[in-house]
Amino acid sequence: MGLGLAAVGRPGYITLGRDHDLPPERDVEAMRHRVHDLLDQAYANGVRHIDTARSYGRAEEFLAGWLNRGEERPGLVVSSKWGYTYTADWRIHAEHPEIKDHSVAAYDRQVVETRRLLGDHLDIYQVHSITPDSTALTDTVLHRRLAALAAEGVTVGLSTSGPGQADAVRAALAVTVDGEPLFRSVQATWNLLEPSVGPALAEAHASGRFVIVKEGLANGRLAVGGEATDRVLGPIAEAAGVSYDVVALAAILRQPWAGTVLSGAATTAQLTSNLRARSLDLTEEQLAALTELAEPRDTYWAERSQLPWN
């Protein structure tokens, strides 16, 4: 499992429950301390992949401060993303908290910003939230820029979002530069409510790409309970003596194509619980029962789009 910093690098995000998960003041120093506490706990408990992005507020900065404390952390993999610019100016509510831009100019600016902070710690650099109509899939000038980064030893990848995730993944797998595949890692949303990208991720894995899974708890929807989750997750969680998040993440860990499954924990208690998924061995019967939770992909993404920044 890995740790994603989307929920803790900025004061506002769409994950449910932030009113009681985060420090009431949510100033920069309070959030910096929260991120460092999570990173300390994650590494101490075997987590070796940290994922961030330019648009996660000051998450890259917070991570850089932790990385530069002078401690040896062998085996750590750091991934970040470019393609969105954080524009909320440390406000919880902003008309446009982030702006998407997959242009060459945006890449040229953001890769410099990322490397200024993360330096040689950067292992994977991903285009943020590619959709099937993204110019990042067709811009050959951008592809050359990304190939140059790959030649320096950084793995070039992408993340996807929206109901067209499978199409975006398959289109990315076909992108080449000088006959060589460009995108070597894929990060996508897969969870018990929205598993539609699964076959495309299996294809990516089979072709040698590294697969990272985000939003495994559906921005908190699978952790808080409800009629369907209580009916389907409840008996399995009760039998195992764990909370819903553990079952939901364990189901992802059972997918043979999953390389890293990200926890999006905002508290150390949540992280402790999330990491219990590594030791929960779901049966085939339980995994089959959990498929009942799947929603039509358009329904899922429509509901996600309505989650307020909070």
Image (cartoon, rainbow, N blue to C red):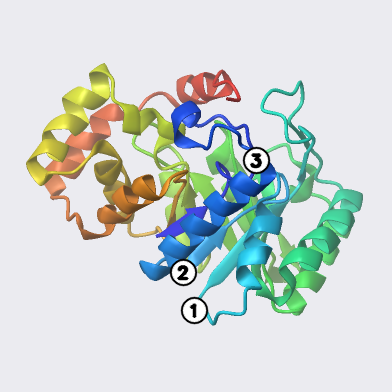
- State whether residue 204 appears in this view: no
Judge by depth and name the residue closer to the eye, 225 or 73: 73
Name of the residue lying farthest toward the right: 105
Q: Are marks 1 and 3 in contact (CB under 8 Å)?
A: no
In screen coordinates, is 40 left or right of 53? left
Q: Earlier in the sequence, mark 1 or mark 3?
A: 3
- Residue located at (47% from left, 19% from top): 299
Instruction: Read off the residue under disc 2.
Output: 48
Q: Secondary structure at mark 3?
A: loop
Q: CA distance from mark 2 to mark 1?
A: 6 Å
Q: Are marks 3 and 2 in contact (CB under 8 Å)?
A: no
- Residue located at (55% from left, 70% from top): 77
Mark linked to residue 75: 1
In screen coordinates, is 206 left or right of 239? right
Q: Secondary structure at mark 1?
A: loop
Quadrant of the drawing holding the N terminus? bottom left
Q: Residues within 10 Å of mark 2 (few under 14, many from 20)?
A: some
Q: Quadrant of residue 65?
A: bottom right
Judge by depth and name the residue closer to the eye, 3 or 165: 3
Q: Secondary structure at mark 2?
A: loop
Q: Earlier in the sequence, mark 2 or mark 1?
A: 2
In screen coordinates, is 90 left or right of 4? right
Q: Quadrant of residue 157?
A: bottom right
Instruction: Read off the residue under disc 3.
Output: 10
- State whether residue 291 appears in this view: yes
Q: Earlier in the sequence, mark 3 or mark 2?
A: 3
Q: Residues within 10 Å of mark 3 (few under 14, many from 20)?
A: many
Q: Amino acid at mark 3?
A: Arg
Q: Nearer the viewer, mark 3 or mark 2?
A: 3
Quadrant of the drawing holding the C terminus? top right
- Residue located at (41% from left, 43% from top): 216
Rendered location of residue 187, percent (x, y)? 55, 52
